[in-house]
Amino acid sequence: MAMTLAYSSLSSSQIRKSHSISLGLGTAGSITSYQHQLNSKLSIGASFSKLLINPTIPLKIAGQEVRVTLQTFMLQGSAFVRFYPFGKKDSTEYKYNNFFISVGFAKKKSSFYELSFSSRDPLQIGQFNLTRAQTGSVNIDVVTQTSLPFVSMGYEKKIKKSRLSIITEAGFYNHGLPLISMSSTGVFRLNDRNKDQIQENISSLRYYPLLNVALGYKL
């Protein structure tokens, strides 16, 4: 009923201005968002993001060359509500709607974090030389919950004489208790006894940063 009254009080041009889209990058990857401004104080929206990272980093540990590979893949859909505390009462006036607070809920279709260690060259221990196969590797998989409530604050800077804007946003997701699984081969099997300690160390990492920069466009 309230939505019907709101639409009846706006002209067709005003209705068009209440819709916007944005494209951005952030800690959740590449992001595409849609937003509908209900009035000067409130808007609702939805977004889709994709993140894929797979770098290999060479490190030297105890004089030995080690390859560290971090891999993560995440598909995520989100729904959110934004509150504009400084928005004017006139629902057609949006130029004061710069600062906002968002609360929402994200659902990840797939998510994993994988960390692997392997020797780049044959490993020398004293007078013994071990091949890469004998040295082996360590793989650590970290899994978090797929339902993520989140909260953030942001600022939208309108670009004069255009429908464009720059949007920055910062906050956090609550992804719950991260759980690890660990597998190893070769002499790296000695690290299996550290699994419980690693799990204890990451148990406090229940939050994932939410940082976004996007280009918005008023339809």
Image: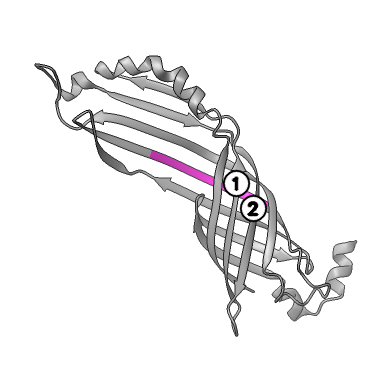
Nearer-the-camera pick, 46 or 85: 85
Provide residue 135's location: percent of width, then percent of height.
21, 21
The numbered mark at residue 152 is 2
Please tell me which residue lies in front, 75 or 99. Answer: 99
* Residue 11 among magenta residues: no
**Residue at image coords 86%, 75%:** 9
Residue type (three-letter) at the residue carrying disc 2: Ser
| Residue nearer the viewer, 111 or 130 | 130
Q: Which residue lies furthest to the bottom in this view?
A: 161
Here the colouring is one colour
Image x and y of residue 79, in percent: 67, 51
Residue identified by numbered label 1? 172
Which quadrant: the N terminus? bottom right
Would you say the residues marked 1 and 2 are in contact, meaning their CB atoms lie under 8 Å apart?
yes
Bounds of the magenta span? 71-79
Where does the image place residue 123, in percent across and percent down from the top left?
Answer: 16, 24
**Spatial distance from mark 1 to mark 2, Cα to Cα?**
6 Å
Q: Earlier in the sequence, mark 1 or mark 2?
A: 2
Element under disc 2: strand
Q: What's under tag 1, amino acid-wise? A: Phe
Instruction: Work out which quarter of the rendered image holds the C terminus and state it.
Output: bottom right
| Residue at x 45% of width, y 24% of height | 198
Task: Answer with left or right where residue 21 lies relative to residue 137.
Answer: right
Q: Main secondary structure of the magenta part?
A: strand
Per the image, label 1 sits on a secondary structure element best described as strand
Q: Give the label on residue 19, or none.
A: none
75 magenta-colored: yes
